[in-house]
Image (cartoon, grey):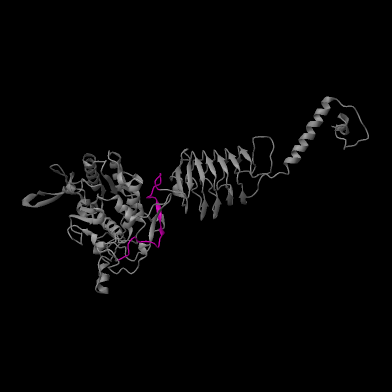
Amino acid sequence: MNLKKLFPITDQFPYFTFTKKKVVSGFSLGIASFFIILFIVCFNVSFKSPISNNFNFQGFDVNNKTSVISWPFSFTRNPAVKKPLMSSIIGDAHFSNFTEGKKNGSYEKDLDLKGTHLSNFSRDEKDGNFNGIYERNHDLEDTHFKNFTNDVKNGSFNGINVKSFDLEGTHLSNLTDNVKNGSLNTHLSNFTGDLKKDADGVFKLGNDSSFYGECDIFNGRWVRDDTKPYYPAGSCPYIDRDFDCHLNKRPDDEYVKWKWQPYGCEIPSLNATDFLERLRGKKLVFVGDSLNRNMWESLVCILRASVTDKNRVYEISGRHEFKKKGFYAFRFEDYNCTIDFVSSPFLVQESTLNGKNGSIVETLRLDLMDRTTSMYHDADVLVFNTGHWWTHEKTSRGEDYYQEGNHVYPRLKVLDAYVRALSTWARWVDTNIDINKTQVIFRGYSVTHFKGGQWNSGGQCHKETEPIFNTSHLTKYPTKMRAFDNVLRAMKTPIVYLNISRLTDYRKDGHPSIYRMEYKSVEEQIAAERSQDCSHWCLPGVPDTWNELLYASLLKVGRGSWKV
């Protein structure tokens, strides 16, 4: 078409000169104006940056097969990006309905999303959101994610393997993770922030983390801490010789220099003076087997270290050894409080029956609590455990041993018996504990580390000097604790569950092994390798952390004198 025949351009734009002039209709003038305006708009757009610092995107889509960026209007600002971006800076940008369909994520190297807002962010691929980000620094400070969805196999941010991931001040609203392996908290590497809801129901990640929120203080890792232990090795005279690895000449001491660090928050160090003040005029009792005695001795030593006059801390009957079954009580005179231990390895009652030919048959009454309940029913804090004695030959075999009423089971599986015993304990707690006075705690199963056999068949943990770091080497959640979970759900009394199974599983280095005694010769020490202790713990050592978590849990519940 010859535009010169339709209208004289020089009439509208005097800068354009032609030799011929004709009169044009209004219709022709309108068509000409449209083409000129279109030209100006296209010319202007083509020289602008494809992503400015303050721009709103609607319907942003990145397709795996092409790199075309599609918009909800009819033209594009920029052609396809043909290769991965080495550095992407989109600070203060806003993404609405952001979708990513690539296998490994959009941005390969440094991703600066500081101040960015993403609404309805979703990814429906195998490896998870931002799975392609593998580099060291990713700044998401003050980033906001709204309606963040991830319907993938490995979980939100699961693919991020970074040294530093800055999420300070980041907000996630309506965070959804319909995935196999659990929450965001589980999959961040070297993550030190907190995930909790603010007043508006928004999940906030930041360094102002607190264990008082929804943080799982039992989900974490061990980190080096040279400020440990709480009391110097060799300073506490109330550690049983079997647990005193320092006194028994264990040559290394690295096992005391580890701190438990939850993934989602910080837990407070055990403030011994504060603990005693909150316990003033009260009684705390540990009830259970020798692993609870391990924990009891640890707490006594931690608290004693804070007392100036050590003579005002003593066991009321004057005893210094506590291996025999019975009742023991440490009195802290300046605080008028006691910290007691009651030996009751099954929690239920050990009994006897008259057998054939006048013999005495030992049984375990699964339907009756141990006779020691009168020693602790009025305590202010009760810490129960049971588990290790259920692995002994007599209990695990279960033949003519378990009793209910007058009936002795010819054979009963140990797990079934364990559940019946726990149910008896739960009924007793629900019936006899005044929840306005007493806080009940149950400490979970402490994992053992026997290699090549059990405690009485050549199992070993000798010469282990550091924790397990590869989580694939950890054991599954103990079956006994799964059984406990089911019993716990049926209880009326609020129970604090110290779920220490996984955190102890890491610590193959913390057992006495052969250092249960001091040896007079090398030959004696070599002979001792045939019978090692890989179930109890050196003190100072791992049970100090259990008490740290006990302290944190009591503060977190915040009842009575434990209100913050």
- Using the image as rendered, state which of residue 498 and residue 445 is in the foreground: 498
- Quadrant of the rendered image containing residue 437: top left
Tell me if 404 is positioned left or right of 263 in this view.
left
Question: Residue at left 21%, top 41%?
Answer: 432
Looking at the rendered image, the quarter that the N terminus falls into is: top right
- Quadrant of the rendered image containing residue 472: bottom left
Q: Taking 9 as reference, is 209 above or below it?
A: below
Coordinates of residue 14 in the picture (x, y in percent): 88, 35
- Predominant secondary structure, magenta span: loop
Question: Residue at left 49%, top 38%?
Answer: 174
Q: Is residue 330 visible?
A: yes
Tally of numbered discs: 0
Residue 236 covered by magenta stretch: no
Residue 230 covered by magenta stretch: yes
Segment colored magenta: 211-233
Q: Is residue 100 visible?
A: no
Name, please, the residue furthest toward the right. Answer: 19
Coordinates of residue 76 in the picture (x, y in percent): 68, 39
Tell me if 139 is positioned left or right of 442 in this view.
right
- Using the image as rendered, state which of residue 362 and residue 60 is in the foreground: 60
Q: Taking 167 as reference, is 542 above or below it?
A: below
Coordinates of residue 218 in the picture (x, y in percent): 37, 50
